[in-house]
Amino acid sequence: MSKKVSELSQEGDSRADEFLVDLGAHVRAVRAQRGMTRKILARDSDVSERYLAKLETGQGNVSILILRQIADAMDMNLIDIHQRSGTNLRVLNMWPRLAEFP
């Protein structure tokens, strides 16, 4: 692998890591604002406490479907989580369409 390709890969990894940390911090903050413990959110979203802990610390690469379960449990939608988290990735431009999922 050339040095340039390696540098681009590392830059992409860094942005992805930053995104996951920001997203996790936002989920944790919203959970706290709503007075929910991780245990309650786990129960209401049908997502394990361990998975939530990884998400909230930026260590978990959350799927969109799991994120939707978490958003639903906090009476939010995916667009709210995206907009309020301060994240900005091009792939998220499709999120308005995701809000239409049942």
Image (tube, helix red, strand yellow):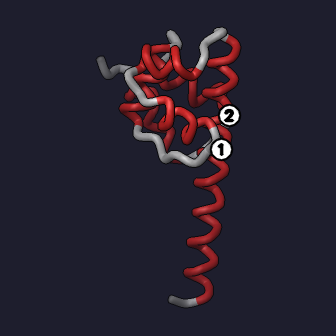
Residue 35 location (% of width, % of height): 66, 9
Mark 1–mark 2 Cα distance, whole angstroms, equals 6 Å
| Residue type pointed to by label 1 | Val
Residue 52 location (% of width, % of height): 52, 32
Residue plotted at (68% across, 17% down): 32
Residue 21 location (% of width, % of height): 65, 44
Is 79 left, or right, of 99 in this rendering? right
Residue found farthest to the left: 102
Residue found farthest to the bottom: 2
Residue at image mark 1 = 21
Looking at the rendering, which quadrant does residue 13 occupy? bottom right
Residue at image mark 2 = 25
Query: Looking at the picture, does residue 47 appear above or below residue 60?
Result: above
Q: Residues within 10 Å of mark 1 (few under 14, many from 20)?
A: many
Front residue of this view, candidates 44 and 23: 44
Residue 72 location (% of width, % of height): 44, 15
Is 2 left, or right, of 99 in this rendering? right
Looking at the rendering, which quadrant does residue 20 occupy? top right
Q: Residues within 10 Å of mark 2 (few under 14, many from 20)?
A: some
Front residue of this view, candidates 49 and 80: 49
Residue plotted at (40% across, 31% down): 66
| Residue type pointed to by label 2 | Ala
Residue plotted at (52% across, 46% down): 60
Question: Which secondary structure lies at badge 1?
Answer: helix
Query: Looking at the picture, does residue 36 appear above or below residue 12?
Result: above
Q: Are marks 1 and 2 in contact (CB under 8 Å)?
A: yes
Query: Looking at the picture, does residue 3 appear above or below residue 87?
Result: below
Front residue of this view, candidates 27 and 16: 27
Residue plotted at (29% across, 17% down): 102
Query: Looking at the picture, does residue 47 appear above or below residue 61?
Result: above
Question: Which secondary structure lies at badge 2?
Answer: helix
